[in-house]
Amino acid sequence: MSLMGKPLFVRQAERVLASRLCGEVVIATTWHPEDDLVVDVCKQEGLPFFRGSADDLLDRHYQAACQFQAGVVIKIPSDCPLIDPAIIDKTISLYLDNPGQYDFVSNLHPATYPDGNDVEIMSFPALETAWEHAQRPLEREHTTPYLWERPDDFRIGNVVMEGGADYSMTHRFTIDYIEDYEFIRAVFEALYPIDPLFDVKAVLQLLERRPDIYAINRKWAGVNWYRHHLDELTTVGAEQTKVIEEAEEGGEVTVEEEAEIRNEGV
């Protein structure tokens, strides 16, 4: 799955690397044989990588942080190829500019940016605590719920979109379905030749001019993994996800680059 001649995850890595504060970027992929391709591409592109569990992402991220001796860990999932480097920096800055004030900072609790600009930053001790104590499957699969579901135990910060805007349930820049890939490809084809590091504002302006592009994956706006766990999550409500009929979910794609783009040691 490619964008402008390169694998989707490489295009995302380019955008993460454009962050001023990203530190070392590590592609944390799995030991599955199909992910050998991810490793081959990482070697060709000079991207550090780590291989770990396919199902226990908390363990994968913890082990990657250990191997790369990260004191601070930033998690950006591999389904965010349109991520804005400035949003990465804004989220990291809240953490770094307030030393000792936060254990975990994100732009997701609650989310306000278009879905697909996910940034989470945490201290290594916080990640290690989650790794040691998280038991529920959703906590192991999604890495950080053990932290943000316990606001009484961890010091949590959140970054919101400028001007009080909230596009989290109306604009979808992430990739799970074939329509998402078609949308992302259309955005790249329109904006990449003008500015390879186009920002979220440029995407929103494009969608105002080109409602046909916005319409490509509009039906999936607001759909996220929370919908499967509303009976388990205490800090996420039904207004933060979209529950759809399972029969509607045809067309889901398996993204070959199912690496997690990880920033270590900021």
Image (spheres, grey):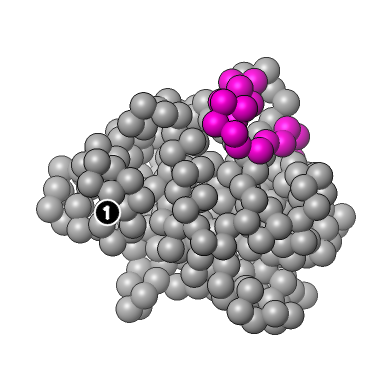
Position of the C terminus, as image quadrant, is bottom right
Q: Is residue 60 left or right of residue 78?
A: right
Residue under the point 50% across and 50% down: 16
Q: Position of residue 11 (x, y in %)?
A: 44, 39
Q: Nearer the viewer, residue 247 or 43?
A: 43
Q: In the figure, 12 relative to 19: above or below?
A: above
Residue under the point 73% across and 33% down: 51
Q: Position of residue 113 (x, y in %)?
A: 40, 63
Residue under the point 72% across and 36% down: 50
Name the image quarter holding residue 259: top right
Q: Is 71 colored magenta in this rendering? A: no
In what element is the residue under mark 1?
helix
Name the image quarter holding residue 28: top right
Q: In the figure, 75 relative to 35: above or below?
A: below
Name the image quarter holding residue 174: top left
Q: Position of residue 71 (x, y in %)?
A: 77, 61
Give the amino acid type for the residue marked by disc 1 in the picture. Val
Q: Is 46 colored magenta in this rendering? A: yes
Residues drawn in magenta: 36-56
Residue under the point 14% across and 48% down: 210
Residue furthest to the left in view is 209
Give the labeled residue for mark 1.
203
Q: Nearer the viewer, residue 178 or 208?
A: 208
